[in-house]
DNA sequence: AGTGTTGCTTGATGAATGTCAATGTTCTCA
DNA sequence: TGAGAACATTGACATTCATCAAGCAACACT
């Protein structure tokens, strides 16, 4: 059991520089979790004493406005960690809700424990700081997107990011409504933007199946050139 | 000279846990800068080999869209550092423009140098990680604001944050246009929102002088209750 | 004081997007 | 296979906000 956990964790950069003994110790107190589709993991405001590594599945991180509107902040997929940055705050509370998008497996790690261990692995500290830096950069890019680009731009660049290198055909791996919220548009608007892209002959969509016909034109849309 | 630098730096948490020898070493390679109003410090995309501590004045961090629109990401005021998180990235480039809003003094610190020294001060690592965590939380709150709240909400909560505890009168310390961009609204819209708040009797504004008449109502606006 | 220059405000208009309501589609499960 | 549920799309409409253009302050400098 603990072996299985170690197996999983050792795949992630954050645990790469731990000594076997340290990894043992982390794995000792770590837990393997299974979530069903739609099952919540934690809610915004809950005390944050653990962080997570996604073994399989997808986790939706979202925030709720007072009026009950949901905004998806990010979708975490297999092989990634989340909520590890909270480890260093005073009275840490999760700033988002976490819910499984589909059946998922996670490893949950005790923050206090891990932090204690960090004191003996400066290398891991550096890895973690690198990790946080990237996240900061990502969030700044996100803010940039939200305030400088139109909905169409955001959809277009997201599609380009989704489209595997040179493969012009692919499937959307998350429900459209969730993707819409991730991109900060209403589902209706998302639908219309997609329709517009289809009507312009740039791509076609059948269910979750996307085919890009004119990558250049899509890139133009992503840049905001109408 | 170096003494003066050390003086300044020692006021900031990030340098609090350094040994005198370490602080010496940092100060050795640090530089004191003076910027005039409007003077740029670095541009988005410049190689990021230094980070900064603001001794006095205010630094505007902003991003430029391809079409030339500017979005102010943050205003850094005296006593704070910025760009320190880039230290841990591969080929670090500043993700924003930095410009002095008014005459300012900064201490500029060599990132490489500081990072090297970090290896010998795990305490400082932890302080830095705490710092980055807070920044992450702040950016998430920002995204939340941008996507879930209207312009009026953002203006209202910003005013509340500006208003010193219980003091219902205060001055705006940055030009309205800059504040508008910081809040992701156009100057015209910002002006109208302010007018609207005045017409509702919630506050009055004379130049940069703000007087809040009805704090409760302002809080309601900040929550989005029309 | 006079005159620019800059930043702020105001009004008229339009585009983008949200809202509400109805319909269509897909998927699941009995 | 059929009924229902959840999701997606579409249309009509309202709202928010940006844009354009003009006027108005405040300030700076001869």
Image: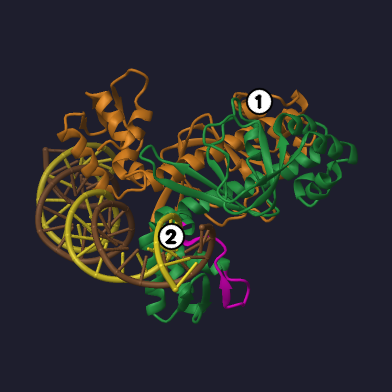
Chain colours: A orange, B green, C yellow, D brown
Question: How many numbered marks have been drawn onto this rendered protein structure?
Answer: 2
Which sits in the foreground, B203 or B128? B203
Residue A97 location (% of width, % of height): 49, 51
Q: Is residue A18 left or right of residue A197?
A: right
Q: Quadrant of residue B98?
A: top right
Could you say which disc has been placed on residue A65 in the image?
2
Residue A11 location (% of width, % of height): 60, 24
Could you say which disc has been placed on residue A3 in the image?
1
Q: Residue at x 65, y 53 (%)?
A: A92
Q: Residue at x 68, y 55 (%)?
A: B78
Chain letter of disc 2 in the image: A
Q: Residues within 10 Å of mark 1 (few under 14, many from 20)?
A: few
Q: Residues within 10 Å of mark 2 (few under 14, many from 20)?
A: some
Separation of disc 2 and disc 1 at Cα?
Answer: 41 Å
> In the rendered image, which quarter contains the N terminus of chain A?
top right
Element carrying mark 1: helix
Chain letter of disc 1 in the image: A
Residue D17 location (% of width, % of height): 33, 58
> In the rendered image, which quarter contains the C terminus of chain A?
top left
Q: Is residue A41 left or right of residue D12?
A: right
Q: Which residues are magenta?
A: B163-177
Residue A225 location (% of width, % of height): 28, 35
Q: Residue furthest right?
A: B20
Could you say which disc has been placed on residue B184 in the image?
none
Residue A121: say if magenta. Answer: no
Residue B117 visible, this angle = yes
Q: Quadrant of residue A75?
A: top left
B212 is higher (above) or lower (below) than B34: below
Which sits in the foreground, B113 or C23? B113
B214 is higher (above) or lower (below) than B185: below
């Amino acid at each position: 059991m603990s072996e299985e956990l170690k197996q999983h964790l050792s795949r992630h950069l954050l645990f790469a520089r731990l000594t076997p003994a340290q990894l043992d110790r982390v794995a000792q107190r770590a837990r393997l979790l299974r979530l069903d589709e739609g099952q919540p993991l934690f809610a915004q405001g809950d005390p944050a004493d653990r962080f997570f590594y996604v073994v399989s599945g997808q986790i939706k991180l979202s925030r709720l406005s007072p009026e009950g509107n949901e905004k998806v902040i990010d979708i975490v997929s297999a092989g990634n960690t989340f909520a590890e940055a909270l480890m260093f705050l005073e009275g840490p509370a999760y700033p988002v809700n976490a819910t499984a998008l589909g059946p998922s497996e996670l490893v949950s790690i005790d923050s206090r424990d891990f932090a204690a261990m960090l004191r003996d692995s400066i290398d891991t500290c550096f890895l973690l700081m690198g990790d946080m830096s990237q996240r900061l950069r990502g969030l700044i890019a996100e803010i940039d997107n939200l305030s400088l680009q139109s909905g169409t731009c955001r959809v277009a660049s997201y599609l380009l990011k989704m489209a595997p290198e040179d493969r012009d055909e692919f499937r959307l791996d998350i429900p459209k409504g969730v993707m819409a919220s991730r991109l900060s548009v209403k589902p209706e608007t998302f639908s219309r933007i997609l329709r517009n892209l289809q009507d312009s002959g740039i791509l076609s969509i059948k269910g979750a199946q996307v085919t890009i016909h004119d990558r250049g034109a899509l890139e133009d849309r992503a840049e905001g050139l109408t």
